[in-house]
Every structure is written in structure tokens, then in C-alpha cells.
Amino acid sequence: MPATPVTAVLVHSPFLGPASLRPLADALASLGHPAVLLDLRPSVVAPPVHQVLLGAFADAMSEELLDGPVVLIGHSGAGPLLPAFADSLEEAVTGLVFVDAGLPTPGRSWRETVPAALYAQLRASTREGQLPRWQRWFDPDPLETLVTDPTLRAEIADEAPEVPIAFLKEERPDVEWTGPAGYVLLSDPYADDAAAAEAKGWPVRRLDTHHLAPATDPQPVATAILEVLTELL
């Protein structure tokens, strides 16, 4: 584990809300590492999403009192934006940890990084330019099997925003990250990202769990993150 307390800034997916990471924040805090978890949902509902999202993140973080090394921990769709989030902060960021997340693709859009059929499917499901909530991208609803606690499941479902499809076509910020980074794999769909991280020489931890484990089984995820950070810092 890191020798000194690390401030973990948790960044939830643009397609989910803070409930998807709040148990993980509590788990990290219980292990002696304070966690900051913002609610970024208000900044993803209208284009240009990237510009508004990064500005809102920087504004909110300017109000936080951060002690010790600061690391950004991004889950799922937040992963590709971690370098831009780090770049937007006044404080120096010591490292990035990607948790079952896509890796950065500076200057490329989400649409360019996924199969054309997936984008076509989502485009067909839009209503007045807005995507359905994340759990409605799939059939059956993944929350039904991944989140057994009905209260938590309802909270995650209710928080998922309807993001404009324009967001999927926006170029991601052209920001490179050259500092320390690591990866925690939770589910098979992100195995290629974990392999790519390993090829870069990043520390990687693989857990036999599922994509929403930061919410449903946070303690092993927190431990894996701290093991990665021990190698980075």
C-alpha cells in the first residue's frame, strides 16, 4: 500500500452517476486514503459535452482541499478523458488509474473507437438527439444481474443521464499523459485495454468480477487500486 495517504479523485463514467463509485470512495477512505467524488451529470446533458464537462470538473475541484499526492481514478467511459481532466486542474496530478476503462485516444471521438454497428444501434435508439440511459443500451438490462441490492440498483439506474449523441461524435481533447499510470481490470470487455496498458509497462491488476464491482464489491477493487499506486508512487 502507498506509504503516505493519497487523495483519490474518482471520476465516474459520463454515462453513469456518482452512485457507481460511491462505495469505492468509502472503501478507499476506510483504508486511509481520502477520496473525492464529484457529480458530473449536469455537465453531460448538452453539447459541447467535453468542453462543459472539463470546465465543470475544474471549477468543482478548485473548491476541494487536497492533501498529499493527488491521483485520478477513472471508471469505464471516464478513462479516455483522464489526461484532459488532469490537465484541467491547478494541482499537479501524480498518477492516473484506469478501472475497467477505455484508454486515452487524444483527438479521436468515441464513434471512431467502437464498431460501426454499435454506433448505428445507439443512433437508432436516440430520442430528440439524446441517448437512452446506459442500462437501456443492452438487452437484457445489465443492472438486473450485476447489482443485486435493489436500492443501489435503483439509485444507479435513476442517476444514469441521457447524454446527447453529439457527444459520441465530438473529438476527445488532444491531451497526452506522460506521467505514471496503471490499470485495474474487472471484466472481459476491457481485457484488450488491460493488455495495452501492460504493453506500455504500466502495473496492471486483474480481478475476477464485473464492470460495476466498484459499487457492489468495492473492497477488493480499492485494494487493487492501492496495489497499483504502490508501484506508481
Image (cartoon, rainbow, N blue to C red):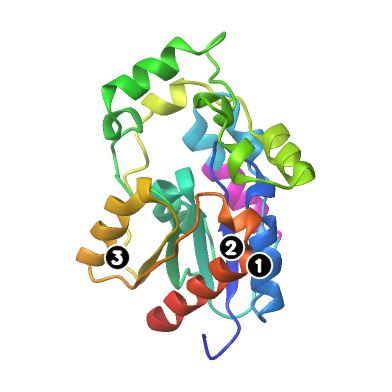
The residue sitting at 62% across, 61% down in the picture is 217
Q: Given this view, does label 3 or label 2 mark the residue nearer the observer?
A: 2
Q: Identify which residue, 73 or 222, lies in the foreground.
A: 222
Name the residue type under label 1.
Ala
Res 120 label: none
Q: Main secondary structure of the magenta part?
A: helix
- Against 153, residue 84 (above or below) is below
Q: Is residue 65 visible?
A: no
- Against 90, residue 126 (above or below) is above
Q: Which residue is mark 3?
A: 178
Res 9 label: 2
Secondary-structure class at tag 1: strand
Q: Is residue 75 visible?
A: yes
Q: Is residue 56 magenta?
A: yes
Q: Give percent across and percent down for residue 2.
A: 52, 85
Q: Give percent across and percent down for residue 96.
A: 43, 65
Q: Give percent across and percent down for residue 115.
A: 27, 28
Q: Which residues are magenta?
A: 54-63
Residue 174 lies left or right of residue 76; in this view the side is: left
Give whichever of discs 3 and 2 has the lower sequence position. Answer: 2
Q: Which residue is mark 1?
A: 35
Alpha-carbon neighbours of circle 1 within 10 Å: few (<14), some, or many (≥20)?
many
Alpha-carbon neighbours of circle 2 within 10 Å: few (<14), some, or many (≥20)?
many
Disc 3 from disc 2: Cα separation? 19 Å
Residue 160 lies left or right of residue 179; in this view the side is: right
- Against 25, residue 191 (above or below) is above
Q: Are marks 1 and 2 in contact (CB under 8 Å)?
A: yes
The residue sitting at 40% across, 17% down in the picture is 121
Name the residue type under label 2.
Val
